[in-house]
Structures are given as C-alpha cells and as structure tokens.
C-alpha cells in the first residue's frame, strides 16, 4: 500500500488542483482502505482497488460541497474574466499550457487520460476504477487524446481577426 502513495497523491492533485486537499484525499483513501481491507479480493490489483476508493471518496466530497460550489460559480459569473489573448508561448510555458489544456477536457476524459497515461494503469484496471467496461475506457482515452491534440492546435493558431471572420 505504501508504494501506491505517490501515485495516489499525483492522481489526487489532478482531481483537486490543491496540494493540501490532495493530501487530505489520500489520507481519507488510506483510512477507508484500512477500514474495509476485508473487502479486498486476493488476486486483484491493489492499486486499482485503492484508486477506486480514492475516486469514490473524491466524488463523495465533491457532492457534499456542491452547494458551496454553486455559490462560488454565481460569484464568478458576476465577475468579468479577462479575455485577453495569450502572447506567444516559450518552451518553459509548454508544460503549464499542457496542464491548462488538460483542465479544458471533460471530467470523464481527463480522468481516463490521467489514469491510463500518467498513472500507467492498464485499460482494464482503469476501467475497474471507474466502474465501466474496458472498451469504454479505451474510447475515453482515445477521445481525450484527440481533444487534447485539437485544443493544442487551437492554442497555437493566431486568433482570427474581425475582417477574416466577415470574409468566411
């Protein structure tokens, strides 16, 4: 179980976007796993079982905070975000850009890509974590990669001017 802690923390950081919340989520996962260790089936993948607990704990916490999030969204909608176009990116910003692009993916696709790509789970193990068929997980990862490539292309193209919009 100790060997999976770095992977759990990494996945938690992608889910929560907050190091402190990620640590809390990992701690909650370990506590839940220890409390229900008799439910672990020998011969199955411990990492997948822990990630399932981890994911379920995250979604449970998210549901509990749903009202708070609704209020925060209302406040954010009242504020006008800056729509300034980003300047040309340099090589150091590429990693940050990838992180931003990942957050533009739908939750299910981002989750699938992180489990299979970053956490190196097999499609079958990632499918068990998400409680879906392996084929669904393969499709999600494929769509996530395609959307990520499309988003990356959009970010590198110069913005269209008003004149160009009127011509097309």
Image: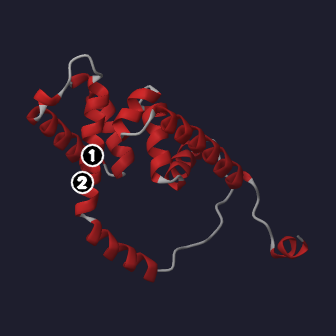
Mark sitting on residue 2: none
Q: Where the N terminus falls, by quadrant?
A: top left
To which residue does mark 1 refer?
A: 56
125 lies above or below 63: above
Scheme of image coloration:
secondary structure
Mark 1: few/some/many CA within 10 Å (<14, 14-19, 20+): some
Q: Is residue 150 visible?
A: yes
Q: Decide if residue 74 is on the left or right side of residue 9.
A: right
Taking the spot 12% from the left edge, 34% from the top edge, the residue there is: 36
Where residue 2 appears, x then y in whole percent?
21, 24
Taking the spot 86% from the left edge, 70% from the top edge, the residue there is: 164
> Is mark 2 in CB contact (under 8 Å) with mark 1?
yes
Where residue 146 appears, x then y in whole percent?
64, 43
Where residue 80 appears, x then y in whole percent?
51, 79
Q: Decide if residue 34 is on the left or right side of residue 107.
A: left
Quadrant of the image occupied by residue 139? top right
CA distance for labels 2 and 1:
6 Å
Q: Is residue 120 visible?
A: no
To which residue does mark 2 refer?
A: 60
Taking the spot 45% from the left edge, 52% from the top edge, the residue there is: 107
Secondary structure at badge 2 equals helix
48 lies above or below 164: above
């Amino acid at each position: 179980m100790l060997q999976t802690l770095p992977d759990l923390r990494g996945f938690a950081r992608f889910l929560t976007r907050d190091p402190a919340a990620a640590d809390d989520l990992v701690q909650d996962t370990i506590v839940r796993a220890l409390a229900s260790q008799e439910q672990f089936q020998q011969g199955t993948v411990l990492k997948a079982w822990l990630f399932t607990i981890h994911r379920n704990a995250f979604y449970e916490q998210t549901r509990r905070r749903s009202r708070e999030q609704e209020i925060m969204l209302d406040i954010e909608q009242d504020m006008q975000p800056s729509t300034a176009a980003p300047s040309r990116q340099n090589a150091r910003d590429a990693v940050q850009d990838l992180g931003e692009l990942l957050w533009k993916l739908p939750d299910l696709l981002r989750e699938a890509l992180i489990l299979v790509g970053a956490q190196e789970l097999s499609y079958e193990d990632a499918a068990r974590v998400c409680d879906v068929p392996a084929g669904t997980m393969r499709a999600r990862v494929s769509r996530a990669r395609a959307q990520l490539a499309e988003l990356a292309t959009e970010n590198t193209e110069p913005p269209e001017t008003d004149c160009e919009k009127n011509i097309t």
